[in-house]
């Protein structure tokens, strides 16, 4: 199988080719940059609509204290995303290995976003305890999930303060699984069909210089290169769906996630009638029903 061969080379390749000496960074990539992504390889494998594997290898050279944030090795996970592999290595300015970091050394904490007070998402991370700049963090991880309805947008860099020496994004779709792609400020993907019928999409970026922070600049997402992907057919929580267009997807959401949810069970309706029995004031009725709902339901970010 071509996909299995690809997995082998993912595990075995590049290990002897990585070179992280700071003098290997072109001068133009250091201008306006607080950090440089030396190498990034993101691969998504979808062997069928019921299984997705995300593999990431990334090396970031932190040039100054302001770039420390970009050098934190991290991976997000939740109940549907399981970490199968995670490790890191720290290199000094000459490119010599300082230490290896095992998964048990990573910190683990909630990753609630700034728009909510609770979410299931968590993050494992390792912030190198060093004040000797520059240094390089190289980390790799693998995340597996059973749902294939969502592909994160791929950004070679998330910040105008980070340059990119080389970044690769690959999506391998098994026979019968299709995706739609949209490139923002990037050339269209190269596509290869393997002998077993899999499709391999590949985006490649080299020598992308940081532009630095600019006063009154628009959000980075509006001008940084990135790739958006949507599956044509997918599986979510045991339910198959299709996403050829918004009408088709909206119909799937209604039929599988929303339809019937507005119907109150008779037992609940009877409880509500009992709660408000004998009350004539509408405000008091609403208050009693509200308290009942509040005590019996857990909800957040509504």
Image (cartoon, helix red, strand yellow):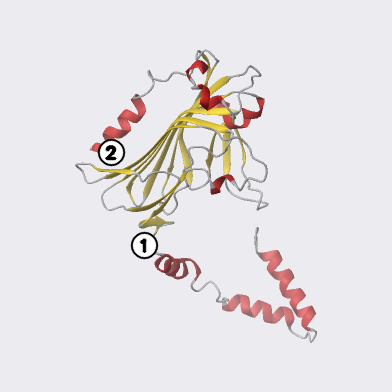
Query: Of 235 and 228, which appears nearest the observer?
Result: 228
What residue is at 27 percent from the left and 53 percent from the top? 176
Where the C terminus falls, by quadrant?
A: bottom right
Q: In the image, residue 119 lies at what x, y percent? A: 61, 50
**Counting residues from the N terminus, which is met first, the one under dot 1 or under dot 2?**
2
Q: Position of residue 52 (x, y in %)?
A: 39, 45
Mark pair 1, 2: CA separation: 26 Å
How many residues crowd around disc 1 within 10 Å: few (fewer than 14), some, or many (20 or more)?
some
Can residue 251 be seen in the rendering of this structure?
A: yes
Q: 302 above or below 207?
A: below
Q: Position of residue 151 (x, y in %)?
A: 44, 49
- Residue situated in front as seen by the camera: 13 or 191: 191
Instruction: State which quadrant residue 127 falls in.
Output: top right
Q: Nearer the viewer, residue 172 or 272?
A: 172
Q: Nearer the viewer, residue 148 or 57?
A: 57
- Residue under pointer 1: 244
Task: Estimate how packed mark 2 is, as few (under 14), some (14 to 19) or many (20 or more) residues with alpha carbons within 10 Å.
Answer: some
Residue 148 numbered mark, or none:
none
In front: label 1 or label 2: 1
Relative vertical location of residue 111 with respect to residue 242 in this rendering, above or below? above
Quick check: 260 above or below 92? Answer: below
Left or right, residue 258 beside residue 119: left
Q: The residue tagged with tag 1: helix, strand or loop? A: loop
Q: Secondary structure at mark 2?
A: helix
Going 66% across and 49% down the picture, which residue do you hit?
Answer: 114
Q: Which residue is mark 2?
A: 3
Does residue 102 show up?
no
Residue 168 placement (x, y as % from top left):
40, 35
The N terminus - image quarter: top left
Total label count?
Answer: 2
Left or right: residue 182 compared with residue 270:
left
């Amino acid at each position: 199988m071509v996909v299995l061969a690809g997995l082998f080379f993912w595990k075995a390749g590049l290990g002897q080719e990585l070179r992280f000496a700071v003098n290997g960074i072109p001068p133009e990539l250091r201008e306006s940059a607080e950090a440089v992504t030396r190498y990034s390889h993101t691969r998504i494998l979808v062997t069928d609509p019921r299984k997705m594997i995300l593999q990431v290898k990334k090396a970031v050279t932190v040039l100054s204290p302001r770039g420390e944030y970009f050098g934190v090795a991290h991976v997000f996970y939740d109940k549907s995303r399981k970490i199968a592999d995670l490790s890191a290595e720290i290199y000094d300015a000459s490119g010599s290995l300082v230490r290896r970091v095992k998964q048990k050394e990573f910190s683990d904490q909630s990753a609630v976003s700034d728009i909510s007070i609770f979410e299931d998402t968590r993050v494992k991370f390792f912030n190198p305890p060093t004040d000797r700049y520059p240094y390089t963090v190289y980390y790799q991880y693998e995340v597996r999930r059973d749902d294939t309805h969502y592909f994160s947008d791929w950004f070679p860099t998330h910040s105008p303060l980070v340059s990119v020496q080389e970044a690769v994004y690959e999506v391998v779709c098994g026979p019968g699984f299709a995706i739609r792609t949209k490139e923002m400020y990037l050339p269209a993907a190269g596509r290869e069909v393997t002998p077993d019928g899999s499709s391999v999409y590949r985006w490649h970026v080299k020598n992308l210089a940081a532009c630095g922070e600019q006063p009154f600049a628009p959000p980075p997402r509006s001008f940084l290169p990135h790739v958006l992907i949507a599956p044509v057919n997918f599986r979510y929580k045991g339910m198959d769906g299709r996403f050829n267009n918004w009408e088709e997807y909206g119909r799937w959401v209604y039929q599988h996630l929303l339809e019937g949810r507005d119907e109150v069970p008779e037992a609940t309706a009877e409880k509500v009638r009992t709660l408000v029995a004998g009350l004539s004031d509408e405000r008091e009725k609403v208050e009693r029903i509200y308290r009942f709902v509040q005590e019996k339901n857990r909800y957040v970010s509504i």
